[in-house]
Image: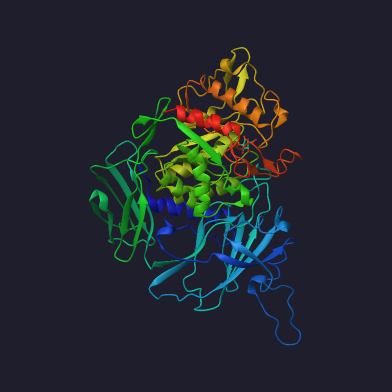
Amino acid sequence: MIMKLTKIIFSCFIICCMTCADLQAQQAIANVYGREVRSLNGKWEAIIDLYDQGRKNKIFLNKKAEGKTDFYEYAFENGLRLNVPSDWNSQMPELKYYEGTVWYARRFDVKQQPAKRLSLYFGAVSYRCRIYLNGKEIGSHEGGFTPFQIEVTGLVKDTGNFLAVEVNNTRTVDAIPAMAFDWWNYGGITRDVFLVNTPKVFIEDYFIQLDKYKADKIDARIALSDKVAGTPLTIEIPELGVRQSLTTDEKGTAEVSFNVKKLERWSPQAPKLYKVIISSPDDKVEEMIGFRNIYVKGEDIYLNDKPIFLKSISFHEEIPQRKGRAFSEPDAVMLLSEAKALGCNMIRLAHYPQNEYIVRMAEKMGFLLWEEIPIWQGIDFENEQTKQKAGNMIGEMVMRDKNRCALTFWGVANETQPSAPRNEFLKHLISCVKDIDTTRLITAAFDLVRFNRDRQVFVMNDPFIKELDVVAVNKYMGWYHQWPVTPDKAVWDVAKGQPLIVSEFGGEALYGQTGNADVVSSWSEDYQATLFRDNLEMFKHIPNLRGTSPWVLFDFRSPFRFHPTNQEDWNRKGLVSDQGYRKKAWYLMKEYYDSIK
Ligand code: GCB
């Protein structure tokens, strides 16, 4: 069952109001890429504001000196220009490690149509921002990886609008992620910026998917932007001969379930998508949607009623050769093609919601997806505000991607230690997800598996796993952990009765480095290959293993990693180097995945 859309929008809105005294941005419209949009991407003017003086000095007013006595110690014009979308770190050597505030600004003209509504949409701004239009603050947002929008109907002029965005990526203890994390703290307007034109009353949201267990029943819910009862809506799926009529209730929402014949279900082997058209008297939106069943029974994960083994891989939203964030469709093709070549049927999008180009392209190319928010170690689970923020963030992620049938897992955490506040926090996240979507599998990755010497087996003790559909374990045998027994004796007794995924394993190797295949510190491809061979052997002794996800597809940039010759700010656990060359372990993994039918 899918929950009421009005409730979704409402609960997210309430959370926004609770967590921030400022004008909070709104929940983004469903399927912005299927709307009438105008891109505001391109070169923006920028000011680096290390000491946070810009707000105090109201530089968003962009005043010009007049008369004899005026002067202003700033100007956006004729200064630094930064690309949007993109991180700032990769655009100037001085900004490589920058953490602080950067102001972005641009002008635009727009003819506001009388019968329309206009909104500003941001795919993501990292990490927090305030938005100013024509000298007035109109919204703010926290969270570097999820979209938001701000309605600007009536706030724009036909010509010469001045849009300024104050972006800050300072790490703080109450943020998500918090003070330390193993990836680059990219700042900036990292995803698309659009002006979105909609009718006055528009189709704000919809959730259309196959019933969790039935192969021929589609459940659909639609929400209008306004609480207007009696509005006729239609859902069409021309290829299936579907034309369903609905009428909105007093909340402006409508729902229907209907049966379909000859539906071809989406799968990694045949990623079939159907054109779905949703219309109201004033509005029409369409997108490609796939249909599939995914559920857990005992220790198995079923896709379209057949048990499946997840041949997964992780990557960060980063193009290593460019040393910057991925933000475009070609970037998505590059990252995903390498995963395809490896023989994967799933991607664990590490460790935060990645851009929609990646998500949509992954679905088209036939990858199941695991998506998570950056609840990555070191989170302040006792902070109520952080908990509310995390709930808001996970809500924004689920809202954006709930119509992607590829989405299989909502991940609620990575490597957390048991405690009452942690449990409460994660339960809150699960309930925020389930407020919107009860059909996907809930998971979290743990790093608590230990070898029990008395029983001579690997075990894990975290009662929280009972809250999850699938248990995931990050275990770095041969890297952070020495082998207590030989890999052929490494038997696991972990999460019995539930499906288990080894969601991370691996070790570092500098591409092209040869060395002793037994010596960890050789940082060689040879040792990395040994490590993979050993882990693949161990996997035979994990009875409930239903998927593996090596860490990681590409070497990625991380200030965590400062070994002068082997790392130089790179985490070298990639199966592929920063220059795109495959390491020896890549071929072992490929062979393993190809052997699993
Ligand atoms: C982990 C983390 C991942 C790190 C990785 C590593 O357990 O989940 O984000 O990058 O280990 O390389 O240590």
Considering only vertical position in the picture, is 341 above or below 107?
above
The residue closer to the viewer here, 261 or 66, is 261
Colouring mode (rainbow / by chain / secondary structure / one colour): rainbow
Q: Position of residue 19 (x, y in %)?
A: 57, 53
Considering only vertical position in the picture, is 593 above or below 159?
above
State whether residue 339 appears in this view.
yes
Which residue: 36% across, 54% down? 287
The residue closer to the viewer here, 306 or 398, is 306
Q: Position of residue 454 (x, y in %)?
A: 62, 12
Which residue: 45% across, 49% down? 361
Rendering quadrant holding ligand 1: top right
Q: Quadrant of residue 455?
A: top right
Give the number of marks: 0
Considering only vertical position in the picture, is 124 above or below 402?
below
Residue extending farthest to the bottom is: 67
Q: Position of residue 533 (x, y in %)?
A: 58, 24
Q: Quadrant of residue 441?
A: top left
User: Quick check: 11 left or right of 58?
Assistant: left
Query: Image quadrant for the C terminus?
Result: top left
Query: Image quadrant for the N terminus?
Result: top left
Q: Position of residue 36 (x, y in %)?
A: 41, 65
State whether residue 466 appears in this view.
no
Residue extending farthest to the top is: 454
